[in-house]
Amino acid sequence: MKLLTFFSLVLCTLSMQAQSITITPANDLTHFSCGKKAVSPPINWKHKLSNVISYGMMVESIDKGGKKIHMIAYNIPGKQFRIPAGLRKHSPFGNKVKFGKTSIGKETYFPYCKKSENEKVSVSIRLIALDAMLPAKDGLSAKEFKALCKKHSVGEGTYTFDL
């Protein structure tokens, strides 16, 4: 019985590792905060997942005022392994990428900010590999986006940093 439990634990660990995505920033991501560039940050990623049809991405920050959503992007083509800076502005994937509503109610990117030098702001970029394309329309809410990603996720990764 102990041997069976050990093998189950090893298999579970291996399957969890196989589903992870490693995200690496393409630049210093503090350059994409307020007062700097008002374009979404560039990221690269790698994984060993199969059957990836598309990706979804959410950029969030947490500060003393709570959580803010800075960008929701989905239908990023599944063959991609990078997103350039300015995803909304430059439409690098032929207008296939759609955008959800941010905390300010817009379907775009808005920069994460520190209100003072002493304030701590934690920013996370979450990338979800999906086995389907999501609705071909802009405007999903964060709740709708998360529910669809949960239903279609084949793996994910998060990159977190502090401003």
Image: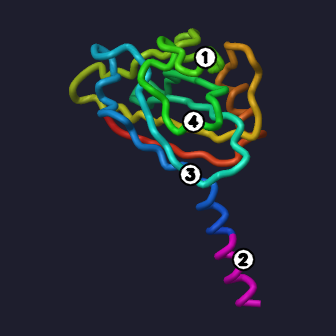
User: In x, y percent, where is residue 95?
Assistant: 62, 14
Q: Amino acid at mark 4?
A: Gln
Mark 4 vs 2, N-terminal side = 2
Q: Is residue 104 above or below residue 25?
A: above
Report the predominant secondary structure element of the magenta stretch. helix
* Magenta residues (range): 1-11
Where disc 4 sits, the SS reads loop
Mark 3 vs 4, N-terminal side = 3
Residue pictured at 64% horizontal, 26% vertical:
74
Within 10 Å of disc 2 (Cα), the crowding (few <14, some 14-19, many 20+) is few
Q: CA distance from mark 2 to mark 3?
A: 23 Å
Determine which residue is flagged by label 4.
80
Determine which residue is flagged by label 1.
94
Where disc 2 sits, the SS reads helix
Q: Amino acid at mark 1?
A: Gly
Query: Which numbered mark, 3 or 1, is in the foreground of this view?
Result: 1
Within 10 Å of disc 4 (Cα), the crowding (few <14, some 14-19, many 20+) is some
Determine which residue is flagged by label 2.
8
Q: Is residue 50 above or below residue 83?
A: below
Tag 2 and tag 3, C-beta contact below 8 Å: no
Q: Amino acid at mark 3?
A: His
Residue pictured at 49% horizontal, 30% vertical:
83
Determine which residue is flagged by label 3.
47
Tag 3 and tag 1, C-beta contact below 8 Å: no
User: In x, y percent, where is residue 52?
Assistant: 69, 42
Q: CA distance from mark 4 to mark 1?
A: 13 Å
Query: Which numbered mark, 2 or 3, is in the foreground of this view?
Result: 3
Q: Amino acid at mark 2?
A: Ser
